[in-house]
Amino acid sequence: MSQPSAYQSLVASFTRLYRYEHLSAMVSWDQATMMPPKGNDARAAAQAELDVLMHATLTDPALAEQLQRAEQEDLSLQERASLREMRREWQRANLLPATLVEAQALAGARCEHAWRSQRTANDWAGFLQNFREVVALSRQEARLLAEAQGCSPYDALMNKYEPGMQSADIDRIFGEVKQWLPGLIAQVMAKQAKEPLHLPQGSFPVEQQRQLGLAVMQLLGFDFDGGRLDVSVHPFCGGVAGDVRITTRYREDDFMQSLMGIIHETGHARYEQGLPRDMLHLPVGRARSMGIHESQSLSFEMQLGRSPAFLSLIAPLVGQYLGEQPALSAANLAGLYSRVHPGFIRVDADELCYPAHVILRYEIEKALMEGEIEAEDIPALWDEKMQAYLGVDTRGNYRQGCLQDIHWTDGSFGYFPSYTLGAMYAAQYFAVMRRDTPDLDQRIAAGDLAVVFDWLQQHIWSQASLHDTNTLVQRATGESLNPAYFHAHLQARYLG
């Protein structure tokens, strides 16, 4: 019996790692949706143990030799891409000691679990006690990675989510947005002040909202044999490609939040469900980056879900499940979902104000990881930037201010730029779709969504991580990321 090649041995190791990751994803989903509060300490210890096991799998000394030998083997182009992604994961893991991996898992679990009640209680001082340790451990990780990669600490962390992207790129892109966004927000608000809308009336029972969400998910092609919808404090998409778990949250006085949240998370889920099945167990078969992942959720939510064409398509469903009233007509829904009003909460923000929320968080977390500020400085900076960018006063309001997001509780620094990068990629995709299919909006209104899904399947989902992000976008749209498409989209939708 012949010995397996070096590449085949690597495949075996990364397949084992994928199975561990599958278990980790299910454990995390349960922690956010089903686990009773007293289970957190034991769950945190179990999750940390699993993280250490995954880290040990990636840092097995045998992998170093196998990666080196595999480079000399006769591999296909797909296998070469696979080897590149394996090496990327291996390099990162080998820069971090197991003790740090375990400490981060434990500190993140403690901080996130306490945050759930501390946010409700507006308890910044209590949150800070756990958060300081998360920051210290994240800085340690950033320093180790930055020294090895020859980059800044923040860039080293961002590389986890946006491989190849640097903060210099983000500074340039976001700097341009800050030049035109405030004026556009003011212009649109002045225009909309003359356009009255009907506000939805009544209580909207959770079960009715849930049934509406399930119906829209079905319309959007979600595979219910390979996933499910649940409730969590912070909506998310988790699980694995063959078992995707999405969540939302409901308010009986406002169905709009949960409905669009479901559409957003369904975009993430369709990406996962559309990844090539023969590569799922390998890094090359995963989503390319978080920016590309967000481009899928925002293709569904912003480009498709908030479009007048799609809202006219689902208006009968909204009426069926929530009752008929003037506010739920197609035209009024389109007005409601495009109404611009600066507010406290990022996940509730309209499409135009949303980038300001992301830029604010990016600037704060970058300064925090670079050591320019300390955790104690966050509230004052938050207040200052919310006032400057959106004219919103958050002084003393930690619950709706710097405690509102879950991301920093587990040390996910470097993640926030992905949201607005995703919005920009999505605008670029749909500009190409509209160029190639001039009657796109008429087809969407008629219920022909396949034209959108087929494009995404061909150009994004099926490609997984075969290409670096820039190449993927170039192959899909004919050019690298061009933020001008995002600006043009916003002007067209909001100023007509």
Image (cartoon, rainbow, N blue to C red):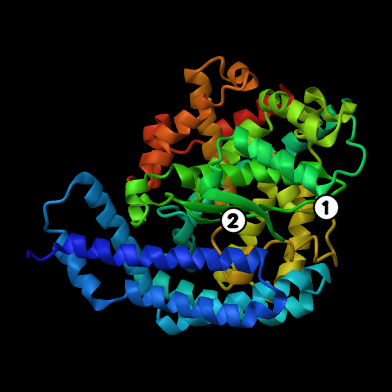
In this view, 133 is above or below 281: below
Identify which residue, 272 or 290, lies in the foreground. 272
Q: Quadrant of residue 331?
A: top right
Give residue 79's position: percent from left, percent from top: 23, 51
Q: Amino acid at mark 2?
A: Phe
On the rendered image, what quadrant is the N terminus found in? bottom left
Gap between marks 1 and 2 measured at Cα: 20 Å
**Nearer to us: label 1 or label 2:** 2
Which label number is shown at residue 183?
A: none
Q: Residue at x 71, y 69 (%)?
A: 378
Identify which residue, 76 or 354, lies in the foreground. 76
Which residue appears farthest toward the bottom when viewing the image?
99
The disc, 1 or 2, on the residue closer to the chain's N-terminal end is 1
Label 1 residue SS: loop
Give residue 269's position: percent from left, percent from top: 54, 46
Query: Badge 1, how many Cα within 10 Å: few under 14, some, many 20+?
Result: some
Which residue appears farthest toward the right when viewing the image?
202
Q: Are marks 1 and 2 in contact (CB under 8 Å)?
A: no
Q: Is residue 227 left or right of residue 119?
A: left
In this view, 375 is above or below 276: below
Give residue 229's position: percent from left, percent from top: 64, 50
Q: Residue at x 52, y 46 (%)?
A: 225
Label 2 residue SS: loop
| Residue designated by label 1 | 392
| Residue designated by label 2 | 416
In this view, 472 is above or below 359: above
Q: Amino acid at mark 1?
A: Val
| Res 175 seen here | no
